Image (spheres, rainbow, N blue to C red):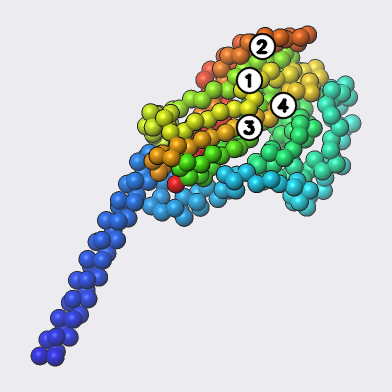
Amino acid sequence: MSKSKRLFDGEYLIRFGFICLIALGLIGLAWTYRFKSNQIVPLNGSNVELVKGKFSELSGISQMREMNITMMGQRISYSNGVDRGAYNINFATFSNLPPIPADWGKAKYAYDVGDYHVFSSIPAEYYTQPEFFDDWETIGMKYQQHAVTGCKNGFFANPNMQKIYTVHGATVDTYAIFRASFCAARAQSFAPIVYVPSGGVTYDGIQFSQDVNVVKNDIKVTFSPSNFVLGKTYPDFDSDWAQKVKITIDVADNTPRGIYMVSVVAGEYKPLFTGSKDIDIDAYKSKEGTPLINLILAVD
């Protein structure tokens, strides 16, 4: 009898454990279904920690911590390393730009390693230096040295993709820099506007699909300032060739848990007062709807 009872006890434990595994599986399935309601392929996960891991490089941006740039990194200040005399470029090219700050290199370091919240703290004299952007050495400097016939106006945004972890009911501030191309011979006007794609592939290969109506109803994105006139960069840099934009993201209280894509594209802006500037008001058409910025939001 005791032997039979022990066997029964073992079977009972096995059955109980099997039932627990099924229950846990169903709970996990329900959790995953809720989270995957937006069907973002590579970024979805069945638990919050996995999502935070995917967004670890920018997790701090959601809180927009104030940063003391003098504490960023130990790199020797770039202001000591920038030797414009070695560029073989006329010094007048940079005459409208402010002096390079003494701790400019630390802000550059923060940007290089992906701490984009550095933009919340630094004024224009940091990011209006063309050396702040990596393509100055590969593109900008070469153009200034040997002007390429046929190079047209254009503009870009940095960083062009940001991954932000947040929660429903939250307001998130992030920043980007709009800047003219290095061969812009005229000022350019445009207004950033929100575009919500139904699906596609991001710059880094993230495939996604989403309910456009859910995104439009639950996620509001605004810009400050709301329009721009970017100065020229050729034959010399205007002081306003690169400008900072604050991007505010409001997530509704009832936003479903999931991952969402919001794109920022260029729209038309006609300044009322142009002063003495020669402004290309059709510059936005050059982007042909290509996103300036993709915001990937993980909403918990």
211 lies above or below 102: above
Indicate which disc, 2 or 4, sits on the residue closer to the N terminus: 4
Are the two marked residues, 1 and 4, in contact with CB atoms closer than 8 angstroms?
Answer: no
Label 2 crowding class (10 Å Cα cut-off): few <14, some 14-19, many 20+?
some
In space, the residues marked 3 and 4 are separated at their CA atoms by: 14 Å
Q: Which mark is residue 242?
A: 4
**Residue 246, numbered circle:** 3
Residue at 65% over, 41% down: 116
Element at label 4: strand
Amino acid beneath label 2: Pro
Q: Which label is found at residue 271? A: 2
Asked if the residue under mark 2 is in contact with the one under mark 3, i.e. CB atoms within 8 Å, the reply is no
Q: From the viewer's side, name the closer residue of 39 and 300.
A: 300
Q: Residues within 10 Å of mark 4 (few under 14, many from 20)?
A: many
Give the mark nearest the N terminus, 3 or 2: 3
Q: Residue at x 41, y 36 (%)?
A: 208
Q: Could you tell whether 26 is left or right of 235 in the image?
A: left
Q: Are marks 2 and 1 in contact (CB under 8 Å)?
A: yes
Question: What is the x, y in percent for residue 282?
Answer: 61, 11
Cα separation between marks 2 and 1: 9 Å
Q: Please tell me how crowded label 1 is: few (under 14), some (14-19), or many (20+) other residues with Cα within 10 Å.
A: some
User: In which quadrant will I find the N terminus?
Assistant: bottom left
* Residue nearest the viewer, comparing 193 with 90: 193
| Residue at which label 1 appears | 227
